Amino acid sequence: MEKVIFHIDVNSAYLSWSSLKLLAQGGSDLRNIPAIIGGDMEKRHGVVLAKSIPAKKYGVSTGEPIVNALRKCPSLVIESPDHALYHEKSRELMGFLADFCPELEQLSVDECFIDFTPVKERYPSPKSAATSLKDRIREQFGFTVNIGISDKKVLAKMASDFEKPDKVHTLYSWQIQEKMWPLSVSSLYMCGKSSTRVLANLGIRTIGDLALTNKEVISAHLKSHGILLWEYANGIDDSQVISTPAEAKGIGNSITLPEDVSDRDKACRYLLSLSDSVAGRLRKAGQFAGMISVEIKYNTFRSVSHQTALSSSTNTSQIIYRTACALFDELWDGTPIRLLGVRSSKLSDTPQPTQLSLFDFQDGFCISPRPVAESATKNSHVSPSKEKLAALDKTLDSIRQKYGDSAVVRGSFLSQ
């Protein structure tokens, strides 16, 4: 059966949800005037988080400093973000969508994927179902969404970014040359400013240019991330919609960084700290993770995430860390990072039968922010077994429980 996937994205979510709150209090609808959602400069929230269509006409853009936006539009109305409200609205919407189709994967607070395939026979067509769904959301909740429809997740995501607001668009695999290839390469999902600059230097301006370029050339300049972009440009994406019951979503941790990070080693030190925290919580709960995911939020407020299934479930700090680093390297496009997160899912009370993995043969074990393979030498040796790593974690947990979390500190943190 041919897959049909929806990507549902709330139009200017923060602005829409704050507008509904103000309207309920007798205030103005921010969506109809030059307005933004912004925040406190001193707390690193002094940027535009969301903008109205009238504000966009003045050249106001998401992610720019509020002071710049005010220069463009002195009459700009600024409303502080209300994250508690946004999470409440998000829960309401996701609950509604889960009733429409339970095969739902939430991507962020205001967007999700739905695998429409199991229920498509109930409707005349996917487009008519999507149109009815977006209309019901507008009528019931008072805000609008865009819905992208495709046979691939990445193409559904691209389709939902076409003309806004309150629209339904299709972008099936057989439509990419007509609908996607003429677009600027900067509009390709996961293609940030840094990647766009590299591609521009290669004479690659459109998504079609990228798709028709030898992927080895792209790989030489952008490594594994370049291959990912080349595949997306050609509509290659075999990822599935992964729906997870709310009670089994997993254990995770994230951190908003004190300053934007553009250095890989520094980012990996944060990943090490997050992996330690997640692994410790897993061990405390007596749980083992079968899947690890990493989230990056850039200083442009664009969020990306990637996940991978483990060959055998684990709650070992070093294995989670190494996996997180590998995911980070696949995700990061060089744009300065504002937030990092590590999450575990597919939890179980007992470990799966252990299988050999690449980690069992990595060279030169050391607990450092750089993955082990990068520091390998000719005299390197086989890394400690999973049993030894588990024993190390057990010893560290015991010391921390007895003397406090700061009793044992990893050497790589001492230079921070």
Image (cartoon, rainbow, N blue to C red):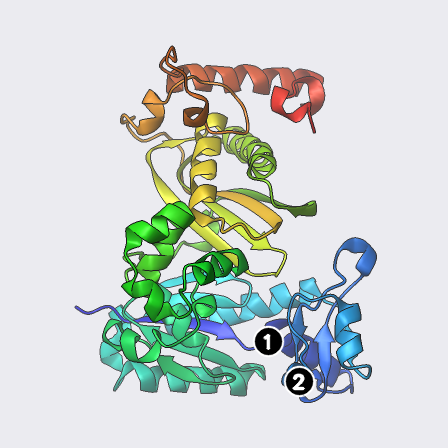
Q: On residue 31, which mark appears? A: 2
> Is residue 143 positioned above or below 324 on the image?
below
Q: Nearer the viewer, residue 139 or 240?
A: 240
Image quarter where the N terminus lies is bottom left
> Type of residue at label 1?
Ser
Which quadrant holds residue 78?
bottom right
Q: Position of residue 387 (x, y in %)?
A: 39, 16
Disc 1/disc 2 C-alpha distance (Å): 9 Å
Residue 275 tag number: none
- Image spot of residue 214 (x, y percent): 27, 56
Residue at 61 percent across and 51 percent down: it is 336
Q: Element at badge 2?
A: helix
Q: Which mark is residue 12?
A: 1
In the rendered view, would you say 108 is above or below 140?
A: above
Residue 211 position (above or below residue 171): above
Q: Position of residue 204 (x, y in %)?
A: 40, 65
Location of the C terminus by quadrant is top right
Amino acid tagged 2? Arg
